[in-house]
Image: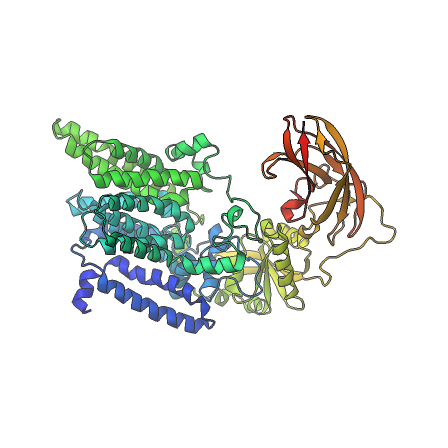
Amino acid sequence: MNLATVRRRIEFGDLLLLFYALVFIREYAWIVPNNLAAWAVSVVVTLALWGTYLKFKPDVDYRVPRVFWITVALPLLIVYVLRAAIPDLSFDVLNHRLIQGERALCGPQLLPGDFFPNVFPFNPSSDMLTGVFRHVLGYRLGTVLNLLALIWTGTILEKILRPLLAGAWQRCLAVFLVLFTEHMMFEIDTYMVDLLALPLILEATRLALGYDETKSRSWDLSWSALLLGSAMGLKLTNAVLVIPVMIVFAIRLAARERDRRIFRDLGLAAILFMLPLLPHVIYIYRQTGNPFFPLYNDVFHSPFWPDNRMGDGRWGPRNLRETFAWPLITFWMPRRLSELGLYAGRLTLGVISAFVCVVLPRIPARVKLLGLICLLGAWAWSFTSGYVRYALFIEILGGLLLICLANYLLIQLKTIPRGLRLSIASLPIALLLAQCVLSASYVSKTEWSQRPISLKATSEEIQWMGRDRDLLSFQSAENRQSFANVDAWIVSSVKSNGVESLLRPHVPMLGINYNEYFDKPASRQLFSRALDNLRGKHTYSLVLDDELESALDSLKRRNLEAGHISNVIIPFYSFRTQFHMTLIEVLVPENNGAVRRPAGQPDVTDITGPLNDDAFVATLSASNFPAAIRAGQIATINVQVMNASAYAWRSRSNKPPAYVINVADIWFRADGKTMVTNMDGRSTLTRDLWPGESGTVQLSIKAPDAPGEYVLEIDLVQEGVAFFKEKGSRTWRTPIKVE
């Protein structure tokens, strides 16, 4: 392949593709134990694959016009530099983005001795990608990847609009308007990763729209599959955007004559789609038993997470009616769209324009399919999350469809007076402009990291650009000495693991601040083994000062003790931006908290808070229960309760009914799965039960009102905390006939 061929085929996005490919190849190279050797292999393989891609890629018969760099790239650059000099302190960045990238760039994301140090060990490829730029360019300029991804997205939009708008200036201005939504601008200079998949999905969309006209169908299908698989590899939530593009490909394929090449192409496309996903899917499955851990654990049943379907009730629609209407009503409900509570309405405008484009007669097939992708994606997003950062691609399609709708009106209304025709055709553009103006007002005030647009702050911070690769270099000699002594981190608060991983990256980290990781016995055993490895080592936790109290509570709940506590100031890549933090020495007890009843201990004492997770272990049995009972009848049964844990169960609460330990009954239908009620009887322990001790409690049960076959389950519950079975304890069950 000669230089002339490369020039004919290479585009702006191809340079970024080199880095995208590098991080996915690096995940495959996790099997290479030496980090330097793994990177050498990754770079060589990536360059070879990139060269192969350029060799087989079809020639590019058009180029992005020069005006694009003035009307699109330059304004985006201006938005970027408004805050780029001030270090990004976004919650998600400090909570999991930094640690994901830092760990995975050096090998498998979970080190030996780790215990889930960040909230969810999702595929770290996107964080590795930002991490590469952060290590090469420094912390501030590392975010330039988001800017480049948006510019790449703009070049693809320009291609899509080329058949609609002949003028380069008009076309490029339209591209900028399509890209200008507040949430895309909020992320343009942060380490949040939602922008990175946009050019991949949009390029696959472009190829799907033109699939029936292209001369390189096999290439387009295969390449699109790889792009869409990569988009899902970067973030699994992109699946709701990927599936509508696949549907359009299916529609295009259905219109073709059947031949063997279709099946060959589909087989190859399926393989290419899976390639970016496989390394992490295999790795995390081997670690947890769930290939998408902790998502869909009600299906995969990892022993390290509750068997439930995850969701965040703070965001998105609250009921089925709202779910169907959500893409249309988002403009009026911004506080349920994101933590920032601001929205200029692109989704609402886009979905309305998509619907109009789908139903209008004589509209080009490409535009109809674009509207179909937008509608399917919008409702799939609504049913799965409704959180605005996961809908940025739908916003792009919405802006694109407003441009298409204006163009359609201009063409179809040519029989009416010119002034009236221009007025009607300009209405979608006017709405788009209004949304952009409102977005600009939001962007000028805030963003995810809450950084100001300040000439003074920028002038103070800009001196560190390009010199901020190592956080330790900003620390005092005393701080560096303190962190050099750390053998392991205990992650006890939500915004500390990013800082901990930057200051001391290659030591085990044990997360204790997410309770779900302690609900299952296998998970608690894994934590106990990780603790065993820390005995005799220097173990610390680093927390923000305002999180100290909750961190100490987390340590206490995990049976860990706080030793020496000292205040530290952490300059965060700047001597102006500083974290006031507390360094806690963590003491690991030798006996793991096992206790026995002391001599002279009263029979009844107060419980003051939630039990330790390992205390939710009971052995239960019941006697004198009826085999059959009348509907609505009340019966009394005897329940034998034994404390099978290593912790004392106190029988009285100083904040009743909170924290009281009760015996409870739960009724299920005959299948043993469909719950009828868990709010029937409750009986409190008559005295404290220490490890190994037993007692009998009388429990009144009331039969369901409808006759039939049922299953009666007996369990313990700590009120306001959890049923014991939710922490892995065994229940007692028996079938009962209700007459």
Q: Where is residue 564 in the image (x, y as percent from the top left)?
A: 67, 62
Residue at the far right: name it: 600
Q: Where is residue 191 in the image (x, y as percent from the top left)?
A: 42, 55
Classify residue 417 by image quadrant: top left
Drawn side of residue 179 relative to residue 454, left or right: left
Quarter of the image with the C terminus is top right
Q: Position of residue 365 (x, y in %)?
A: 21, 39
The answer, for residue 549, to whether it is visible in the render is yes
Q: Return the residue nearer the eye: 458 or 269.
A: 269
Is residue 190 positioned above or below 334 on the image?
Answer: below
Q: Where is residue 277 in the image (x, y as percent from the top left)?
A: 40, 57
Residue visible at 66% across and 64% down in the picture? 532
Q: How many labels does the image show?
A: 0
The answer, for residue 575, to whether it is visible in the render is no
Q: Return the residue nearer the eye: 693 or 99.
A: 693
Quarter of the image with the N terminus is bottom left
Q: Return the residue nearer the eye: 312 or 427.
A: 312
Q: Which colour scheme is used?
A: rainbow
Q: Return the residue nearer the eye: 259 or 642.
A: 259
